[in-house]
Image (spheres, rainbow, N blue to C red):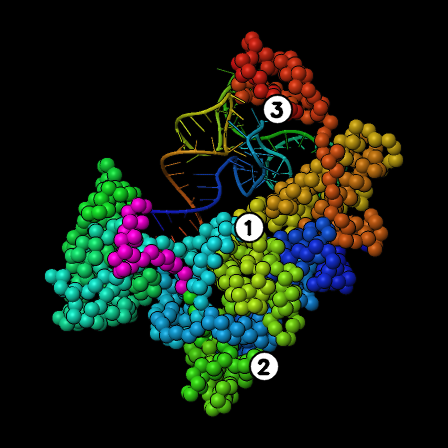
Amino acid sequence: MSEVYDPQAIEARWQARWADERTYEVDNDDPRPHYYTLCMYPYPSGSAHMGHVRNYTFGDLIVRYRTMTGHAVLSPMGFDSFGLPAENAAIKTGRHPRAFTDERIEELRSSILRIGAVYDWRREVRSHDPSYIRGTQLIFLRLLAAGLAYRKESPVNWCPGCQTVLANEQVLADGTCERSGDPVAKRDLEQWFFKITDYAQQLLDDIDDLEWPERVKTMQRNWIGRSEGAEFDLDLCDADGEPHPDGHAVRVFTTRPDTSFGMTYAVLAPEHPLVPAVTAPERMEEVLSFVERARATSDIDRLSSEGSLDKRGVFTGAHLRNPFTGRPVPLYLADYVLSSYGTGAIMAVPAEDQRDWDFAVAHGLDIVRTIAPPEGWDGEAYSGDGVHINSEWLDGLGKVDGIAAAITWLEAEGIGEAKVTYRLRDWLLSRQRFWGCPIPVVHCDGCGVVPVPEDQLPVVAPDDVEFLPTGESPLRAHAGFLHTTCPACGAEARRETDTMDTFVDSSWYFLRFTDPHNDELPFDADAVARWLPVDQYIGGVEHAILHLMYARFFTKALADIGLVPPAVREPFRRLFTQGMIRLDGDKMSKSKGNLVAPEEILDREGADALRLAHLFVGPPQDDVDWESVGLDGCARFISRIWRLARGEIGSAPVERGATAADEELRSATHRMIAKVTEDFERWSYNTAVAACMEHTNAVYRYVQGDDAPQRAALDEAVDALLLVLAPMAPHVTAELWAHRRGADAHIHAEAWPVAEAGRLVADTVTLVVQVNGKVRDTLEVPAGITEEEAVALARASEKVAAHLSGEPRKVIVKLPKLVSFVA
RNA sequence: GCCCGGGUGGCGGAAUCGGUAGACGCGGGGGACUCAAAAUCCCUUGCCCUCGUGGCGUGCGGGUUCGAGUCCCGCCCCGGGCACCA
């Protein structure tokens, strides 16, 4: 047992003991109530950085707290071990990504251990383990069989830097790759997709019941982007309104069918399939060159060309009949209409849509208002509510009624109907990379795409590949992997060489943790039923859309195909998103070169001080600047606790009857317990630490007072302090507990202290006396004071009398804290 | 443009239900201990002045209320998300 506080020795010893005693290993049939807490499994990039420390400090606090409150806590850790950095390192160094990755995992694991975070390491998973690959592939095949995975040729996002296609979610708003920053181009490739759009409505509806930060819920709602409106057909015609001989019709989606009388032109996306068929011969050359230009232009350039709208659209020479007016309107192509949203075609109503207004002005098209703008309106397009005008049978109706009436009319005419459209697109999962989970299908000239039978899983990439900067997966060049036989007909066939997006791996790892050694299935449904949904998920807000949306989709889809129990519709009941660590306003990151290495601090002040500093600096959800992290103050606090708990402060305690001071200390102890417990429940760790500091200061004053401390009151005060600090500063509290109770005593096996209700009420309280709402005096009064006594005492105050002449008009009393006189 | 957060001392932050604004910590000032320093311990610390039984004070302007950091209306600023989504 250490005599002086030596964090390195203490921390190493307790970390070893937690591992030896298997304190935090938990079985699925544990009789205690189950609690599943999970930090997002990390990509193994080497030693932990401050963001990890912060994340695992919060996670570990919950594990230890919930264990002390009597729960069987599932606390697993794993590694999101597929991904681009390992493959890029392989290209640079020639080393296999597995060797590189396994080293990074060991570095990260050892720094996670050093902060004292505890896990059930028996359950560790790694995305690149063959057993995990098998699970990922089996899930893929089941989704394929259920029609939830499919292949389609489509223009996809291609990142020239990463040499791969990207999901929409990985393309930033400015059209660049979220990883490399390169402008993303469009390419036509046959790719695998998951049908997440089938779940758009469920994903939207179920957000409501999640205990997630409102910010994250809003981001998901926006991403799904539901909009209600109508779809209808516009018949192709000539400039005089005569029907086109081929009878083509263009279907458009609009949220404002009520404004249809104001449609003065229509627009197709450049990629729209009808473009060649409808374009007038004399306009063909110009139209095709426009289409070519639009296709060659990356999204980033499409956006930057804003302002030159005349160049961004072209007339097709064709017309469409506005079914509401019966009149022909010109049909344009414009790159501001997206082929991937709605029907890829719009009716344009310049008076009620600013983009249409701008385009109409640039091209000299008519503008007809169908909603009267408010009095004094000096803007251009008006999209708000108002009374319809110029709209025949819609005139006089408001916006909402107008929409309903227009839809009724479309349905009665048989040319359209109400329609809900989502912004969410299907999830493109193919990646032309090596270091990912292979897509387990075979391409056969006779049979087409053939799934690899489940009993032949996993399909694992070979090791003897060459990593060259060719921009192609080395799998394509590996004859042994590429050439195989068709599982269906036995003929020669080629393996799929694309791998899956690593977000596929992270979409089910939380399920695997419940049953990590299952060789038959990714996981057993009963095991999942015992733990899911995750009671507390913790991670960075940067995953608010991608990972969290995909994991939700997987949970629903896997439940629908019978892998996950039907009752589990959501993976994460409660989500907490922690703030970022900044240094001088910048995000702390390797690429910015402004990292503060946790190791140095662990070597100096120790893990407990670092953990407390992270907890104390401010609300966990807020970003923190490293400069404001009060490491010294927390280290000082720990040494105050150290001396106090070892009886090195003040006079020696004695056995005696309780004095008022003793009773007051005991009351303070129980108020502290209540405060910390409440703060833990509401994720207010900074105030929990503050409450512990405050109590420590009170105990210091108590033991240094004129009277010797009473042993019972002092022991209770110190024990309670150690117990509530145990989840926050686990090593030093364990050491001090063993010092006080014997070497076998284990503080983390103790029950969480419970505040006695009878102790929470102080004997005397501060009564605030106000006159006209201003504080004029404060009086110490017995807690059980009556209203009459309180008012009498307040009236007797000279300070009150100075501001109150005569009788008050009104007296407001809120016992026992407030008496307020109204003059 | 739309949607979320947020704005409180020199600094990080607290105030949980409309009731003492500034808990706790950092930093500052003073003192004790010491030959001295470090460490430690104690006191003090929103601003202003005519120093009182004083005034002001939670981004700005209004309002509700006996009483507003907290509720309502209108702005300003900062951070984040989404954005030719028809």
Q: Residues within 10 Å of mark 1 (few under 14, many from 20)?
A: some
C-alpha span from label 2 to label 1: 40 Å
Nearer the N terminus, badge 1 or badge 3? 1
**What secondary structure is marked by label 3?**
strand
- Residue B35, quarter of picture: top right
Q: Chain of mark 1?
A: A
Q: Residues within 10 Å of mark 2 (few under 14, many from 20)?
A: few
Give residue A570's position: percent from left, percent from top.
55, 58
Q: Chain of mark 2?
A: A
Mark in front: 2 vs 3: 2
Q: Residues within 10 Å of mark 3 (few under 14, many from 20)?
A: few
Can you identify the residue that label 3 sits on? A814
Give residue A390's position: percent from left, percent from top.
19, 46
Residue A421 appears left or right of A775? left
Nearer the N terminus, badge 2 or badge 1? 1
Quadrant holding the N terminus of chain A: bottom right
**What secondary structure is marked by label 1?**
loop
Can you identify the residue that label 1 sits on? A211
- Residue A811, quarter of picture: top right
Labelled disc at residue A455: 2
